[in-house]
Structure formats: structure tokens, C-alpha cells
Amino acid sequence: MNLLEEGKALTLDFKKLRKVAETDQDVIPVVLQHAESGKVLFIGYANDLALKETFTTRQAVLWSTSRNELWRKGATSGDVLDLVDVRVNCEQNSVLYRVIPRKGGVCHTKDATGQARQTCYYRSTTAMDRELEFV
């Protein structure tokens, strides 16, 4: 079992943005939101190429900061996210992809039935010293 993804200990990665900066890629944060329910699905990053590919394919395309490559969401899992629209924040330093999941699953982790979770935000906590609870 992957304790980071399936455990109840709160171990936030406060160094994530430093790691992203070390890739030497010019990226912006992307919030992915279900266009119908309003649920936040996950957060990723896009560079210029990923954003252009998103507009061209009308599917969510991101830049993988861990693999340092273009990430076509669903290319291997089948969990494709069809694009409804892209919204830009006031300072133009992040975007919101409003999407519709083609199959229903979104996260690379699986629920108790073995299905891809419908959001990457499947645990909650009420304080820094509290265990995570599955929601």
C-alpha cells in the first residue's frame, strides 16, 4: 500500500513548487474542475505547449513536472477529460480547465472497488495534527 496516497498521516509536500521551479520549465498552475458539478478534480501545471494542445484537441493536456514531459490526461488510463472551456485568473498566472470526464474516473489512485477515483481530493482533515479521513 502506498501510504502517501492511501494512508491517514498528513504529510504535505511544501517543497513541491521548489521542485517545479528546478525543472526549469515555464509553467502555470491549472485547476481542473468538473464543468457540471463544480467539483475540483485536481491541480496540475501547463506550459505553452500543453495549453496549445488543450485548445487543439479539446481535451485536458498538462505538463508533467515529475516526468518533465507533455501529459495527455487519459492517454494510458482512458480517463480522458473533455474540455468545456479555459478560464484565466485576474493576474493571468493560473488557469481553470472546466472539463467533463469521459469515463467518470479522474485520479490515478483507485477506490475500494478498484475504480479510478472521481477526484484527487478524497481525504479531509480539520487540523495539522489530525489524521486524514476518507470522504
Image (tube, rainbow, N blue to C red):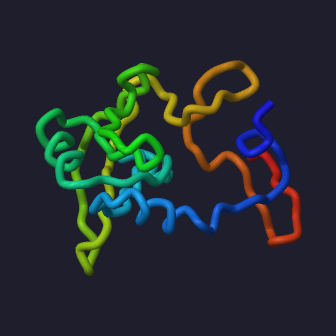
In the image: residue 108, left or right of residue 132: left
Q: In the rendering, at what x and y percent does residue 8 appear?
A: 84, 49
**Disc count in the image?**
0
Q: Residue at x 80, y 30 (%)?
A: 1
Q: Left or right: 96 with respect to 56?
A: right
**Could you say where residue 81 lies in the image, as x and y percent from the top left?**
35, 34
Q: Position of residue 117 (x, y in %)?
A: 60, 33
Instruction: Decide which of 68, 129 is in the foreground and name it.
Output: 68
The image shows residue 64, relative to residue 117, as above or below, that is: below
Q: Residue at x 68, y 19 (%)?
A: 114
Q: Image height check: is 73 above or below 127? A: above
Q: Is residue 76 above or below residue 134?
A: above
113 to the left or right of 92: right
Quarter where residue 57 is shown: top left
Q: Is residue 42 above or below residue 127?
A: above
Toward the viewer: 109 or 115? 109
**Residue 19 at x, y = what percent?**
50, 61
Instruction: Give the residue at x 35% y 23%.
Output: 75
Which residue in the rendered view is the most extreme toward the bottom? 91
For the point 42% across and 50% down, the residue is 65
Tell which of 19 and 46 is nearer to you: 19
Most extreme residue toward the right is: 130
